[in-house]
Image (spheres, grey):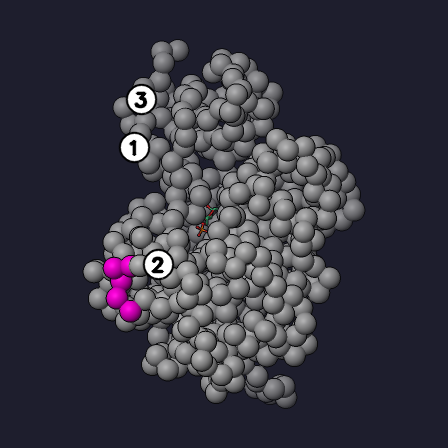
Amino acid sequence: MLNGLMMDTQLTVNSIRDFASQVHAASELVSVTGDGGVQHFSYAESFARAGQLANALLQAGILAGDRVATLAWNDHRHFELYYGISGLGAVCHTINPRLFPEQIQYIINHAEDRLLFVDPQFLPLLEKLADNLAGVEQIILLSDDAHVPDSSIPGLVSYESFIGAHSAAVPWPELDERSASSLCYTSGTTGNPKGVLYSHRSTVLHAYAGALPDSLNLSGRDVVMPIVPMFHVNAWGIPYSAAMVGAKLVLPGARMGDGKALYQLIESEGVTVSAGVPTVWLALLAYLQASGQTLTRLQRIIVGGAACPVSIMEDFRERHGVQVIHAWGMTETSPLGTINTPRSASEAEPGPLRDKLQALQGRPVFGVDLRIVAADGNLQPRDGKASGEVQVRGPWICSGYFGRESATSHTTDGWFKTGDIATLSPAGIMHITDRVKDVIKSGGEWISSIDLENAAVGHPAIREAAVIGVPHPRWTERPLLIAVLEAGKNVSAADLLAWLEGRIARWWIPADVQFVAELPHTATGKLNKVALREQFKDYSLPPE
Ligand code: AMP
């Protein structure tokens, strides 16, 4: 082999920090916190504070490979933790506070977290768990001294006093790019959560890919606000991509589900691009509708984490001139897997057909190898019809779970089995139709619960919809539509089913509709179909 003569510098989170501190020193970071309101920092100031934090961690005895956990919203302190912890070679373990307390306890103990950085809002939760967290040496409250409440937790200190006395100059170690940088547990609906352990290399490569024009298209001219939480898959890598390109970063704090607060921040900070799951956009759109306000500065949003209903796309485009870009990914894929950026001018044409195309999950990003495999193990053709499980591989796809060597989700030839069912079009566009566990098989054919749900929320009186399969003597299973009505609106089951006719294949029309006040969700805001099936286990279809 003839080796190339290129330098082998390591792709580390520290390299992003060093670059951004020099080249984008004056770029801004805006943060909303419970104790400080809206605060403005430069990247240089933020990285200096991350340095102070790193020295405080060193003094606390944190070593390379140690796990340091966060239970925190998107704000400047969380950003500092990302860089301060990983920069030392320790692992920034972000915990989803919306998980059940027993799951949080499991995760902290399984990860063997040594320190916990906690937003004051989650203190009551931790006070209940503290006795069962034997390995945690210290809990640090993400606030200043003035906002540390009385607590049963001994030795509670504020973040500001924890970092306060320390210098910003750090003896940062030379890290191997393959070493672990951060950790995030997936929250499946069954079994214990599983830890996905990102490396410096995977994080940097994913940040490059995330910034690309056909990905999130981030640049120094952008003002980017991740509404996707920093506790969920590193906020889709935005805290790294933004620093790489020098985009102004707006971190909205605890009020990520508050449409009014989001609107005000978008307008006052001039946010051009934002990213989040469908639910947050529904909250924003509901506020805009009720208040009659329009978005004047936002150009585009990236929607992922669950299928994006076409109604969201229409609303943003027609009322606010905002482009919606649909993306698919998972905790195990860092998360960027596919993204649906228009490839050509004709694909970008506005209108219903474009919306239909845009509702698909898109093409893989360079770096993600993707294939569709049938239940019998055969590779499916890319014909837009044949469906199967999505399998992926690439430098930012997980190769196993932390501390759970036996919990493999991989094929023998090294592909990660996503558990999602999809088709791939000849143009390489992926369409997710279901989770493997949620598929509805009717008369030997599959009905896509996701497509049905999206069709149903297109009705103006339907706020949210879920479809599950229920046993049927002739067809094996038929779809049952379970829907939540929009406040103040109404539609009968018969009218809703009639409305669906012509919008979906005839044999997909649900066998029945049940209205509920709310649907169960997982900690990451996805429909919890396991809970829903349990709720409807005694349900039987009306006689035909
Ligand atoms: P998580 O690991 O919690 O981020 O969940 C990943 C799962 O969310 C995927 O396996 C999909 O089932 C679902 N998901 C993410 N993005 C999309 C999307 N754009 N459309 C449909 N499902 C999605």
Q: Is residue 341 magenta?
A: no
Residue 467 on image: x %, y %: 44, 30
The location of residue 521, given as percent across then percent down, is: 40, 39
3D distance between C-alphas at marks 2 and 3: 48 Å
User: In this figure, which residue is indicated by the disc labeled 3?
Assistant: 539
Q: Amino acid at mark 2?
A: Pro
Q: Determine contact: label 2, label 3, CB under 8 Å.
A: no
Residue at 70 percent of width and 53 percent of height: 270
Q: Is residue 247 visible?
A: yes
Task: Residue type at mark 3: give it.
Answer: Tyr
Quadrant of the rendering where the C terminus is positioned: top left
Q: Magenta region, mostly helix, strand or loop?
A: loop
Kind of residue indicated by mark 1: Glu
Q: Which residue is mark 2?
A: 149
Which type of secondary structure does the marked residue at label 1 adopt?
helix
Specify whether 16 is left or right of 179: right
Determine the residue positioned at 41% across, 26% down: 517
**Upstream in sequence: badge 2 or badge 3:** 2
Quick one: SS at disc 2? loop
Front residue of 112/201: it is 112
Region of the chain picked out in magenta, as a range: 151-155
**For the residue carrying disc 3, how many other residues have a C-alpha within 10 Å: few (<14), some (14-19), or many (20+)?**
few
